[in-house]
Amino acid sequence: MTIQEKLKQYQQEKKAILATNFYNLETLQGILIAASKMQVPAILQLTKSSIDYMGLKEAVVMARQGLADYQVEGWLHLDHGGSVDLVQACLDEGFESVMIDASEKSFDENIRITSEVVKRAKAYNANVEAELGFIAKLGQEQSGGYTTVDEASRFVAETGIDALAIAIGSAHGFYKSVPKLNIERLKEIHAAIDTILVLHGSSGIPHSQVKEAIRNGITKVNLATEIKDTFMRALKQILQTTDEIDLRKVFPKATNAVVDLLSDKYAMVENR
């Protein structure tokens, strides 16, 4: 099943697919062990920083082999692609899904750049995600900039994207206070367009709010910050209590913490 078909299926069932970022072998294993345990599909996401760290070809081979080894239905997705060139490189490496993020540019420029990516992705039958509105990135103030219904409708019509990340009160990274998603705005956008809607910045959002968002139109939920934070917190705790120098014995314990985190998150998005 293509990622587009799977997302549409989940949209109809009022469930969401958890899209998880991985940063190394251990976080990838944590994702796949949890997905296999929970018997759910997985969208494996890579950002430019992770690609630069691991290498594009190396990361792709590792992800593909992992999906096969753990017998998980899954797809590779470029998260927050900042340039058409990076998108093209990922398409050439077989990514089934790509995101072009021109959300900080003008509305018209966002449309122009996104339309170019949609045009290129068609030759690969790849899913295209874009972002509209202000979803604060790390270090930015988490306020305002909700996606409007009119702009979402025009953006989808003029670009032909498959999925749209909308600004409804979430932010990337950690929250300084408990976030409050604008469910009414989500409902309005979902009623106006049939495009797959994506929630970015789910780390730290209470499960009840995420579930409410899924019931009202969110079909893809991105998770990144909590994965690396959970791994590093567990690793730091382990290192404070052992003199073990064999990373092959230490790292799996931190991976287990990621498995526990993601098992809970998969149950959340599957409405279990």
Image (cartoon, rainbow, N blue to C red):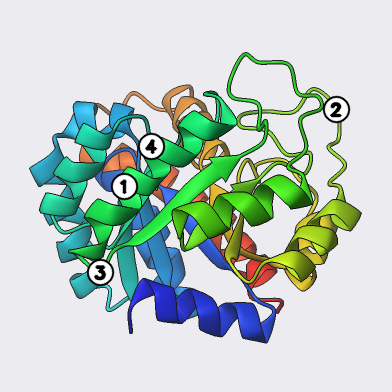
Do residues under tags 3 and 4 come within 8 Å of each other at their CB atoms?
no
Q: Nearer the viewer, residue 108 or 60?
A: 108
Q: Is residue 7 left or right of residue 94?
A: right
Question: Disc 3 on helix, strand or loop?
Answer: loop
Q: Secondary structure at mark 1?
A: helix
Marks 2 and 4: CB-CB under 8 Å? no
Q: Which mark is residue 113?
A: 4
C-alpha distance separating marks 3 and 1: 12 Å
The picture quadrant where one finds residue 188 is: bottom right
Quarter of the image where one finds residue 42:
bottom left
Q: Residues within 10 Å of mark 4 (few under 14, many from 20)?
A: some
Which three-letter amino acid code belongs to the residue tagged 1?
A: Val
Q: Position of residue 208 (x, y in %)?
A: 84, 60
Q: Residue drawn 79% across and 57% down? A: 186
Relative depth, front residue between 248 and 28: 28
User: Dot 2: within a 10 Å radius of its alpha carbon, few (fewer than 14), some, or many (20 or more) residues?
Assistant: few
Identify the residue position indicated by label 1 in the image. Answer: 117
Tell whether label 2 touches label 3 (CB within 8 Å).
no
What is the number of the mark on residue 177? 2
Secondary structure state at the residue bearing disc 4? helix
- The residue drawn where x is 67% and y is 28% is 174
Residue 190 drawn at (x, y percent): 74, 66
Residue indicated by mark 3: 125
How far apart are the alpha carbons under marks 4 and 1? 7 Å
How far, Cα to Cα, is label 2 from label 4?
34 Å
Which residue type does callout 4 highlight?
Ile
**Residue type for callout 3:** Asn
Q: CA distance from mark 3 to mark 4?
A: 18 Å
- Whether residues under marks 4 and 1 lie with C-beta atoms below 8 angstroms apart, the answer is yes
Instruction: Name the mark nearer the viewer: 3 or 4.
Output: 4
* Mark 2 / mark 4, whichever is N-terminal: 4
Residue 117 percent across, percent down from the top left: 31, 47
